[in-house]
Image (cartoon, grey):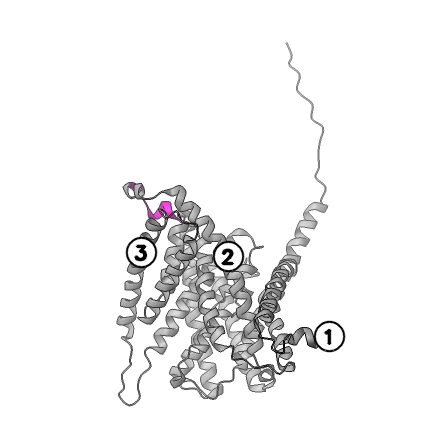
Amino acid sequence: MLSNILLGSGNIFSSYNLIIEASAIIIISYFFNILSKKTNIPSVLMLIVLGVVLNYGIKAAGAEIDFFPILQVLGIVGLIMIVLEAALELKLERDKAIPILVAFALALVGLLLSTWIAALILQHFLEMPTQQAWIYATPLSILSSAIIIPSVVGLRNDKKEFHIYESTFSDILGIMMFYFLTGNIVDESTGHAEGGGVSGFIGGVLLTIVISLVASYAIILIFQNIKSHVKLFVLIAVLMLLYSVAKLYHLSPLIIILVFGLMIANMELFFPGKFRKYLNLEKAMHIYEELHIITLETAFVVRTFFFVIFGISIVLSSLADWNVVMVSLLIIASIYVIRFVMLRLTMGSDIIPQVYIAPRGLITILLFNAIPESIQFEGFNSGILLFVIIGTSLIMTFAMIYDKNRSGQEISKAKSVDVGYTKWKAPSIED
């Protein structure tokens, strides 16, 4: 009976079977989200486990499919949606300038230090050349906003905002650093790099910022006057088009997404004085509110399928290699040591659970798949990637559960203390 349901018309990837499977995965993911809020176990971990289980089912059915192209497309779309979702949440207010700068500095320093230490570990234990070691270490050093943003909704507001800023900056800076490194590999025969070096990189970033501002202003001013009900998906299509074109020209396309999101979430700031007369605030706010909902739900769907397919594609046997375990544990340890020192110096003693919220995820997977074949290192075991992702996610899970229990105990303790009272008598007025 079960085999008939699973196989359907003899092909688990037939049209109706695909609809059934996709619908079931989305429904299961929704309940994973509910379970995640109650237990603080990241829904991403549950989705990966679901993918591993489905992988055994696919093998049992005798079916084979190459999920890599699907994973790559889902990763890119998911990245755009997640960064846009995060940007729409960020309010640029004067009293938040320092927290934003602190989050940016911690994301940058954490990225550089973690990459440096991870590269040294890869060089020593895998005998990987320096340039390749830095390229392989970069994805392992990027925080996953895809995991962090949905996981920190229950934290105190200032802590939640810090994680949104930090993880978003880490995504953008990490991707920029990765493509800078891969684009500037030194050719051993000529001794020169193909890319434009540091000056070319900085020029590309500045050009991207200019394009981002011009494009964002144009999109808001044009789309606020469009009356069609389908304009929001057209808007998203325009953003994806800009992202893809910028990527083809080796710019930093995530900056375009970030700037647009920040601009539409903070329109009064970006349309000051006389310039505000060009902005129909009521219509533009309507676009913002609807875009926020669509982005949130699209990110949920894309994130769901990305991590399920990643779970399907992983090889669990790679975790049995002792060298994989040793290298992975050293990289994980370096991540938290660096993070502890940075947060202790900048935030004082109130760094729980922030110090443990440093999972790796979507960006890490996406960038590993983007390493050019010409510079891939045969001695690198993909089990390291899987071990670091699962390890950092589990550490975050335990930290979030501990923090939730600690907060609950403090609230219960406060409620158990009786509040004293005294009788009060109105003073009399003497003649």
The answer to whether residue 304 shows anywhere in this view is yes
- Secondary structure of the residue carrying numbered label 3: helix
Is 186 above or below relative to 25? below
Mark with earlier residue (2, 3):
3
Horizontally, is 209 left or right of 314 in the view? left
Q: Amino acid at mark 3?
A: Leu
Horizontally, is 382 left or right of 102 in the view? right
Quadrant location of residue 106? bottom left
Mark with earlier residue (1, 3):
1
Residue linked to disc 2: 296
Callout 3: few (<14), some (14-19), or many (20+) C-alpha neighbours within 10 Å? some
Percent position of residue 269, x then y: 36, 47
Is 388 above or below relative to 280? below
Viewer-side label of 1, 2: 1
Residue linked to disc 1: 1
Horizontally, is 221 left or right of 133 in the view? left
Find out whether residue 269 is within the magenta segment. Answer: yes
Residue linked to disc 3: 213
Quadrant location of residue 276? top left
Magenta part, dominant SS: helix
Quadrant location of residue 109? bottom left
**Extreme-bottom residue of the structure:** 189
Q: Amino acid at mark 2?
A: Leu
Is 100 above or below relative to 243? above
Callout 2: few (<14), some (14-19), or many (20+) C-alpha neighbours within 10 Å? some
Callout 1: few (<14), some (14-19), or many (20+) C-alpha neighbours within 10 Å? few
Q: Amino acid at mark 1?
A: Met
Percent position of residue 184, x then y: 32, 78
Q: Read off the magenta span.
A: 266-273
The alpha-carbon separation of the residues under discs 1 and 3 comes to 58 Å
